[in-house]
Every structure is written in C-alpha cells, then in structure tokens.
Image: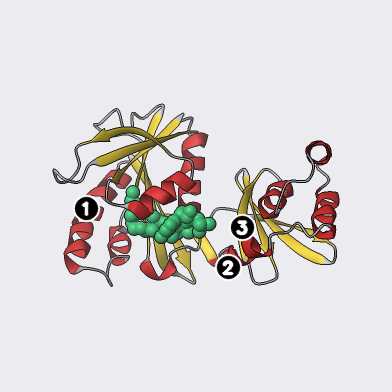
C-alpha cells in the first residue's frame, strides 16, 4: 500500500514552503530549485539547519518556545543569516514522484533487477539471495518495500521481523533491516533515507524497540549513510571474508 503523505503549505515572506508529513518527519520544499529536505517535528528544524549562526540564545529560546516559525524566518532573513551555500547543497528531490510500496512475495526479481547494469557476478548472487529472502516474505517473517519513480523500481529494503539469529531479529523487541539498495542512477536523492524511514516506522508500529543491521567494514558509503540516519556500532563480527569484518549497527526506536 502506498504510504500516505500529507502536504501543507506555509507562506514565508511571499515564498511558499511546502511541507509534506511522513510519519513523525516532515519534508520541506524550497521552490528555488533546492527541492525537499527532511527535518523533524516542525518547520523550525529546517530554519535552524539553514541558519548561518545561532541567534542570541535568549531569542532562540523564546522563538523555540513560541514556535513562531515566521518570526524566526524573518529574523534570519533580516540579519542575513540564511546560509545560501547550504541551501544550494540540499539535494534536488522531486518527492512527488517517489512512491514507496509494499513488495509482493513473488517480486524477488525486481530486487535483482536493481543490479542489472552492474557487475554480472553480483547480479546473479543477488538474484539467488533475493529469491531466498522473498520466501521469508511469503511466510511473513520479513516484509519488503520498493521505491518507484514513474512505475520504475529504483530502490528496495527489507525488514526482518524474526529469524534464527535471535540477536538480530527476535520477533518481539529486535528487528533487522536488510538489503537496502538504491539503483546507481538514483543515488543521493534521499530514496535510501525514505526506504529506511518506512521500515523504521513499521517496526515501531509493530512494537519493536530496536533495529539492527550489518554493514561490511569496506562499505564506507553505507557506513556514512547509517551514521547520518543515527545508527551506532553494536559489535564487530566475522564478515564474508577473513579480511572484511562485519559491523553490526543498531538504533533504538
Ligand atoms: C547506501 C545507499 C542505500 C544510500 O542510498 P541513497 O538514496 O543514495 O542515500 P540518501 O540520498 O538517502 O543519503 C542520505 C545520507 O547518507 C549519506 N550518504 C549517502 N551516500 C553517500 C555517499 N556516496 N558519500 C557520502 N555520504 C553519503 C549522506 O549523509 C546523505 O545525506 P546528504 O545527501 O544530505 O549528505 C546506496 O548508496 C546504495 O544502494 N548502496 C549500495 C548498496 C548498499 O551498500 N547498501 C547498504 C548495505 S548495509
């Protein structure tokens, strides 16, 4: 089922900020070609993010308390405190186009297809693995999601609810995020962030307390990604080869 996203608008000095609510997070759209940016709780977060420097602590406190986004925005503009560089660096994400949907048990091929343009050995390895993973989807031990843009699959993720390694997923408190993948042509557009957000929300709704996942020692991009999403190191384990260790990360939900 597609995730329902509500859109709200806020006028700030003649500019329209379009907010989209997704679970407990919001995305804000800046019309001046910067796209959507995720922030938490309120419009305040994005303004703090964009501020060059903090307003004096007293004013900051008052503004936060009153949650008067408009006043704060005016203040930043008047004092030239909006960091234009930061604004420019925000990724252009056309959120309207991204759809996250639950996967069906017979859709393992769509996951493998994300690797079609890559190394063929990897493609065949993933194809086999995906078939096994989706058998687990069939019996309800895990759920999978796909990200789509204009009907094309551009990303995938799985949430393992229960498995034999009870220190990874125990069907009750602990759940494991597995095989997040974004197609190479669609990287850095917050698709991975949205996929993970989707499974984290689901895990929370189901009453899980913690998510875990494994990342290879040599996968530096993924480590940066998980760090950005608030994951911390739980333990270091033996990996797929002797040289490359597996880092188990976790996040409390
Ligand atoms: C890891 C992966 C899923 C990230 O997907 P993505 O949609 O590109 O990531 P997002 O756009 O949501 O990135 C969120 C944040 O992660 C970090 N990040 C993502 N890719 C990065 C990169 N190449 N270099 C540095 N930081 C990166 C950044 O902090 C980024 O935020 P920013 O763009 O505002 O700086 C994607 O790179 C991928 O599919 N990799 C191959 C499969 C894989 O390794 N999966 C993880 C297995 S543990």
The residue tagged 1 is 129
Q: How many marks?
A: 3
Q: Is residue 180 visible?
A: no
* Disc with the residue nearer the chain's start (1 vs 2): 2
Please state the horizontal and vertical placement of residue 22, each as a whole percent of the image.
60, 50
Q: CA distance from mark 2 to mark 3?
A: 10 Å
The residue tagged 3 is 37
Query: Would you identify the image quadrant in which residue 212 lies?
Result: top left
Q: As drawn, is 3 to the left or to the right of 217? A: right
Label 2 close to label 3 by CB (< 8 Å): no
Please state the horizontal and vertical placement of residue 75, each as a whole percent of the image.
84, 53
Query: Would you identify the image quadrant in which residue 10 lies?
Result: bottom right
Query: Would you identify the image quadrant in which residue 130 lies?
Result: bottom left
Mark 1 or 2, closer to the camera: 2
Quadrant location, ligand no. 1:
bottom left
Tag 2, which secondary structure?
loop
Label 1 close to label 3 by CB (< 8 Å): no
Q: What residue lies at 70% left-to-right and 69% top-to-bottom?
A: 31
Q: What residue lies at 46% left-to-right and 64% top-to-bottom?
A: 148
Q: As drawn, is 137 to the left or to the right of 24? A: left
* Disc with the residue nearer the chain's start (2 vs 3): 3
Q: Is residue 56 visible?
A: yes
Q: What residue lies at 74% left-to-right and 61% top-to-bottom?
A: 17
Question: Of 83 and 225, which appears nearest the observer?
Answer: 83
Q: Mark 3 near ligand 1 (CB under 8 Å)?
A: yes
Tag 1, which secondary structure?
helix
Tag 3, which secondary structure?
strand
Q: What residue lies at 52% left-to-right and 41% top-to-bottom?
A: 201
The residue tagged 2 is 94
Q: CA distance from mark 1 to mark 3?
A: 34 Å
């Amino acid at each position: 089922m597609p995730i329902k996203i509500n859109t709200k608008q806020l006028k700030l000095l003649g500019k329209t900020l379009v907010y989209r609510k997704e679970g407990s997070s919001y995305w804000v759209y800046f019309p001046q070609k910067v796209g959507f940016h995720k922030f938490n709780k309120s419009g305040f977060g994005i303004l703090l993010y964009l501020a060059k420097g903090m307003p004096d602590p007293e004013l900051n406190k008052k503004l936060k308390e009153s949650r008067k986004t408009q006043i704060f925005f005016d203040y930043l503009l008047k004092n030239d405190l909006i960091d234009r560089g930061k604004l420019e660096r925000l990724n252009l994400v056309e959120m309207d186009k991204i759809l996250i949907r639950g996967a069906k048990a017979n859709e393992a091929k769509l996951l493998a297809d994300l690797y079609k343009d890559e190394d063929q050995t990897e493609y065949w390895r993933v194809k086999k693995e995906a078939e096994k993973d989706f058998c687990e989807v069939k019996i309800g031990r895990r759920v999978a999601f796909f990200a789509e843009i204009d009907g094309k699959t551009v990303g995938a993720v799985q949430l393992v609810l229960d498995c034999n390694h009870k220190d990874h997923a125990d069907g009750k408190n602990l759940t494991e995020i597995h095989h997040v993948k974004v197609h190479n042509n669609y990287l850095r557009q917050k698709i991975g962030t949205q996929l993970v957000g989707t499974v984290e929300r689901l895990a929370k709704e189901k009453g899980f307390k913690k998510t875990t996942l494994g990342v290879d020692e040599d996968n530096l991009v993924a480590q940066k990604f998980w760090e950005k999403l608030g994951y911390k190191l739980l333990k270091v384990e033996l990996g797929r080869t002797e040289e490359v260790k597996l880092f188990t990360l976790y996040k409390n939900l």
